[in-house]
Amino acid sequence: MIRSTEDFRNLLKAARRAGTPLLAIRTADPASAMAQVSACLCGKTEVPVFAWDIMGGVAARNKAAKEATAHVFGEKAAIAGPADVLLALHKGAAVKQFADAIVFFNNPQRIWEQVDIVQGVWNLRDAFKVGGQMLVLVTTPGSVLPVELQNDVMIIDEPLPSADDLREIIPGMFESAELAPPDVSVVDQAVDALVGLAAFPAEQALAMSLSKKGLDVERLWERKRQAVEQAPGLTIWRGGETFADIGGCDNIKRFLSAVLTGQESPRVVVFVDEIEKAFAGTGTDTSGVKTEMTGTMLGWMQDRGADGIIAIGPPDAAKSMIAKAAGNTAGIPTVAFDLSAMQSSLVGGSGERLRAALQVVDAISQGKSLWIATCNSITSLPPELRRRFTLGTFFFDLPSAEEREAIWKIYLAKWKVDGERPNDEGWTGAEIRDVAARRGG
């Protein structure tokens, strides 16, 4: 598991030293990934570096590549299609000027299922192994290689920038905006707001949040929310409620408060609503999509040591409210995790979206996430998934008379109303809220 940019670079250098001919880099920032690979050449400027994309064709990225272009690609390098480029690379593997070259192949996930593309990539394995070249497939987070290439292509995931990486970006952005260097507290606030974004969108969000008055932290957070929500199925909760706004549920509030303020306190709360519906069909769906997604979730939570609770009980028993209020109570973001919104009609698309979303959660939480899942029927939840919620299962019952009294006080004060209360025996907190809201309206 790659945690830092340094780990990523070390792995790239190891792959280069080992003469790896086929490499796939899954990244949210292709420009950053290509720069990182180029930086691993250890100053060897004589190594040709090329890049191909569907619009620009082949482009030389350094002087050595410009000198080698005609020997390998001829005069049509700029307009060469993907199959033609792969064929030219295979024929040119033995060309002296092309020795040890690196070739970036951008967005291959859009075309690598085509028979000529998958065959063209596979054909380069042995030819590039002999010639010392490396084909780098620069693809999206969570993408899955065609089965024909899975045993021949090494996969590396570029991590999103860590807090330390972002701290290096921030002073330069202040300088570019002709602002005084930020103090430590401002840098810390900016890092908290930016973590979870790739380098380019982080720079853009920061630049748009700077003015002559300094850094607008709230605007930065809003831009961060918008960027995170580009990942299908992820939403940052914008409500302002805390545990103080919830009547009753004292046991779970005390428990979660201890977790949120403990030595290994989480940096993000991940809220999964009605989790049994999200994972319905695991092991029985004919497409295998739900089973694959369940396996991905199980592996991710196991590898990260993610903690979590399952909240079970009747509807409107404050399960979701507790989950949404946990983040604000601790001063950390709450991310709503909607698995159904991650499903795609494209083959492999659902798993790709899920892995991309988990990468964002991993970056935001910096490896410390608290998962809170609500559930109406725990018997339909896969037992292996239940075991991943290591902090236990909590039952939410209808509020007692004492708890209903506390709920009435909160909502009557919120809506600034008073008067005789109805018989509330058997009422849920949501029903009390609705009555108080109607009176206040």
Image (tube, helix red, strand yellow):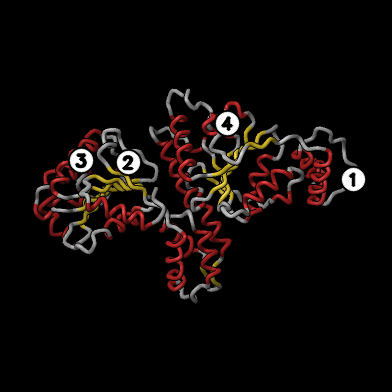
User: Taking 364 as reference, is 308 above or below it?
Assistant: above
SS for tag 3?
Answer: helix
Of the residues tagged 2 and 4, which is closer to the observer? 4
Dot 1 alpha-carbon crowd within 10 angstroms: few under 14, some 14 to 19, many 20 or more: few
Report which residue position mark 4 lands on: 276
The CA span between labels 2 and 3 is 14 Å
User: Taking 66 as reference, is 407 above or below it?
Assistant: above
Residue type, mark 1 in image: Gly
Report which residue position mark 1 lands on: 419
Residue type, mark 2 in image: Gln
Determine whether label 2 and label 3 are within 8 Å by CB.
no
The CA span between labels 3 and 1 is 77 Å
Report which residue position mark 2 lands on: 109
Front residue of 23/339: it is 23
Question: Furthest residue to the front?
Answer: 263
Of the residues tagged 2 and 3, which is closer to the observer? 2
Q: Earlier in the sequence, mark 3 or mark 4?
A: 3
Report which residue position mark 3 lands on: 83
Could you say where residue 12 lies in the image, as x and y percent from the top left? 29, 53
